[in-house]
Image: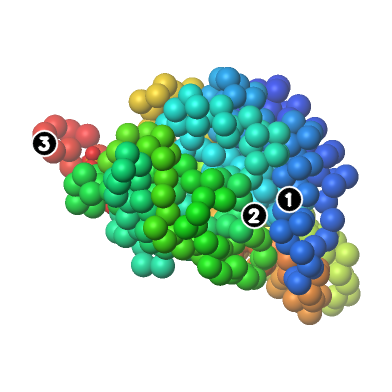
Amino acid sequence: MRPTAIDTPFFEPRHRDLAAALDAFAAREAAPHPHGSDVDAACRGWVRALGQAGFLAHCVPAAHGGVSASVESRALCVAREVLAWHDGLADFAFAMQGLGSGAITLAGSEAQRARWLPAVARGEAIAAFALSEPHAGSDAAALSTAAHREGGGWVLDGEKTWISNGGIADVYCVFARTGEAPGARGISAFVVPADTAGLVVAERIDVIAPHPLARLVFRDCRLPADALLGRAGEGFKLAMRTLDIFRASVAAAALGFARRALAASVERAHGRRMFGGTLGDLDLTVAALGDLATAIDAAALLTARAAWKRDNGDASTRTTREAAMAKLAATEVAQRAADRAVQLHGGDGVRAGSVPERLYREVRALRIYEGATEVQRLIVGRQTLAAAVPPTGDPA
Ligand code: COS
């Protein structure tokens, strides 16, 4: 497959080369992993293979084993669209290496970066991002896992849930309340190796598109002073900056699923005979596919814009709004595309193991994780309101 917007000016020849290399790699490596199979082993296998082939190097900066000086959003997007088209677990394995290590890339000390990033890039260490809690999902600033200073280090207590790579990760970036101020300004980030005493994988969580996922408990979990990631009290902003990068890439993964669903629908429309013609002869089918193709292209352009703007900005460039729009549009159209593929396949669309059935399960979580659709609407809506009525009273 070729990423939807790859031939627009947002992308460069090296992105087209990356897409072609990954497409060949994924076509070779993709294998079915039915519900009940060993998802940990499959995920580890993808991490190892992606690392050995050099693709995970796109998840970290060049100074620590990566490809570009700073992690390039367009490369992440290209990789995720291609991988998702082939295999949701391959996309997951790739993306979580980036998300899990993203806060270390953005704010880690030289020692933290040197310890973890090259190993993440080689696929020798698995990383995880631990923000969500049982009572703090969309309202991330309400998190209650706490860290306090003691004996020159930190003690972490609390619970995290829905942690991707939970149970197989070697390192977790954990966000905890440190109390410098109420709310978002009183949160800090920590690098917590998986073998730290007091960190327990309390529950493995099974979901409709299985991947390693867990609830973690921290009980009297003692960390050295240098486990602090970035500055104390700036953990919430660090989490948001990390999500700004990866939300656009979730959009790209959604495009991969959407394109695969559209391809399956087109194949079905051509091949399914009915009413003396084919399914594709029916105006209802034509219109539905037209709507989907348009919405997919629109989402692809939003995604490319978000990634391009970040890659072409400086450290102060915020792409929160663009990334939110991209994630919102792409994940919603992916859901519609998967649903349409199921509908056009009729009974075959709900047969366990069929492409539409797999896509239908795979796309659902994308509208929830890394900021639910409602959070993206909130972000875009708030910024729209702020822009329309500037506090100075000047025209927008
Ligand atoms: N980059 C840098 N700073 C950011 C930021 C960003 N993208 N987003 C917010 N901030 C800053 C704000 O500027 C503000 O700073 P000041 O206190 O200095 O003004 C601070 O962070 C708090 O921001 P805000 O008031 O907007 O926070 P809210 O509590 O209202 O939360 C949402 C905003 C809902 C957008 C946020 O909680 C969110 O993204 N929730 C979803 C979390 C999520 O994605 N979870 C999934 C985890 S991975 S599966």
Q: Are marks 1 and 2 in contact (CB under 8 Å)?
A: yes
- Quadrant placement of the N terminus: top right
Residue to which mark 1 is pinned: 44
In the rendered image, which quarter is residue 88 located in?
A: bottom right
What residue lies at 46% left-to-right and 38% top-to-bottom?
Answer: 103
Judged from the image, the secondary structure of the residue bearing numbered disc 3 is loop
Instruction: Give residue 383's position: percent from left, percent from top.
Output: 29, 44
Mark 1 vs mark 3, CA separation in Å: 55 Å
Residue to which mark 2 is pinned: 168
* Nearer to me, 272 or 359: 359
- Three-letter code, disc 1: Arg
Instruction: Give residue 172's position: percent from left, percent from top.
Output: 52, 48
Instruction: Give residue 113's position: percent from left, percent from top.
Output: 52, 29
Judged from the image, the secondary structure of the residue bearing numbered disc 2 is loop
Residue to which mark 3 is pinned: 393
Vertical arrangement, residue 61 with respect to residue 45, above or below: above
Q: Earlier in the sequence, mark 1 or mark 2?
A: 1
